[in-house]
Amino acid sequence: MILELHLLQSFPVSNLNRDDVGQPKTATFGGVTRGRISSQSLKRAARNLFAQHGLDEHETAVRTKRLRAEAAAVLAERGRDLDEARGVAIAGLEKLGFGVDQTTGLTEYLLFVGHDAITYLAGYCDEHWDELLAIAAAKEGTKKPPKVKPDKDALTHARRLLDASRAADVALFGRMIADNKDFSVTAASQVAHALSTHAVATEFDFYTAVDDLKPEAESGADMIGTVDFNAACYYRYANLDLDQLERNLGGDHDLAARAAKAWLNAFIHAVPSGKQNSMAALTKPEVLLGVVRDGDAWNLANAFLKPVSDADVMTASAHRLAAHFTQLRGFYGDDGIRAAIAASVTSEPLTIEGAETAANLGEFTAGLLAATEPAAV
């Protein structure tokens, strides 16, 4: 079963997601330049909201290279010497088959793991303290530290460390472990890059700053610069495979249901953090369309293949979205669609043929989540 979310969201002056030269990201679509917000940026913004929408912190994950530092801190809290614990934690990670930079203590790549991974690593190090301490001592002062052979039971321990069956965001967004595909997790959620429904042009703000303590007799700016920005109405799309989500969470239906609810609400409220302190582009989606279907998935971005050029961009975009969805249903059929619910912030309701209309966000999310339950079949 697939849960789809389609949003129209207008941002004023903003630079929510920058490229390598500091400009708002863009893409060419329909022959013109569009504003773009990367899926990675939107996923991170959503992940940061999961705890506000029904998930406990220990049911989420962290993406980090710093397991050694965190595990060493736990060991220190348990009475171990902190300096020794740092060396032991490196040796522990290597015994479990993970490459670690000997100078920084960082793992070779970011690991997407549940919060329990930190306490599990600390427990493993505590249990094998003398052996790991001897390995750490043998490395001290050597230019080329000897390689540590992984524990013969490393696979079992590594599975415990990388266990994601209780980490909702790993289950949602997946994980790839290059060294061992057995630890990879197939993502239950697909997230599109947000695209503006119309053509955009990147503009820039020229700013100056003055030293507050400069003598009045001196004139001129003490700092000058530019900040790039755009303003655009974006189409956002994401979907969630509820069956895959439950499989990823070890068949835990309750956790999967709460994760789906958190996913739905978090994506509606997700706003990237880029340049927000200087631009405060903290808007909400104005048009929402949710679909629950047995299979397949429809990204409706082609509704905007021809860029919107109306002065009222939001209204025109909403009509385009509704019309395109109706056209697809007419051509491909709607046998697999369990529910379609539309909602709009404006006083003019979004009317889509064959779709219910929700009066507010609570009705919108409750209707979609109810349609995902077995009783809705």
Image (cartoon, rainbow, N blue to C red):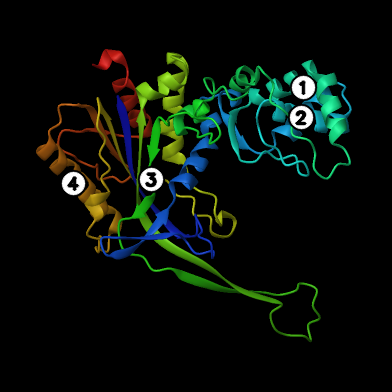
Relative height, residue 307 to residue 322 (above, below): below
Residue 324 bears which disc, if any?
A: 4
Q: Amino acid at mark 1?
A: Cys
Q: CA distance from mark 4 to mark 1?
A: 57 Å
- Mark 4 or mark 1: whose residue is earlier in sequence: 1
Q: Amino acid at mark 4?
A: His
Residue 323 bears which disc, if any?
A: none
Q: Are marks 2 and 3 in contact (CB under 8 Å)?
A: no
Relative height, residue 125 to residue 106 (above, below): above
Q: CA distance from mark 1 to mark 2?
A: 9 Å
Q: CA distance from mark 4 to mark 2?
A: 57 Å
The residue indicated by pointer 3 is: 285
The residue indicated by pointer 1 is: 125
Q: Quadrant of the C terminus?
A: top left
Q: Amino acid at mark 3?
A: Pro
Of tags 4 and 3, the one toward the viewer is: 4
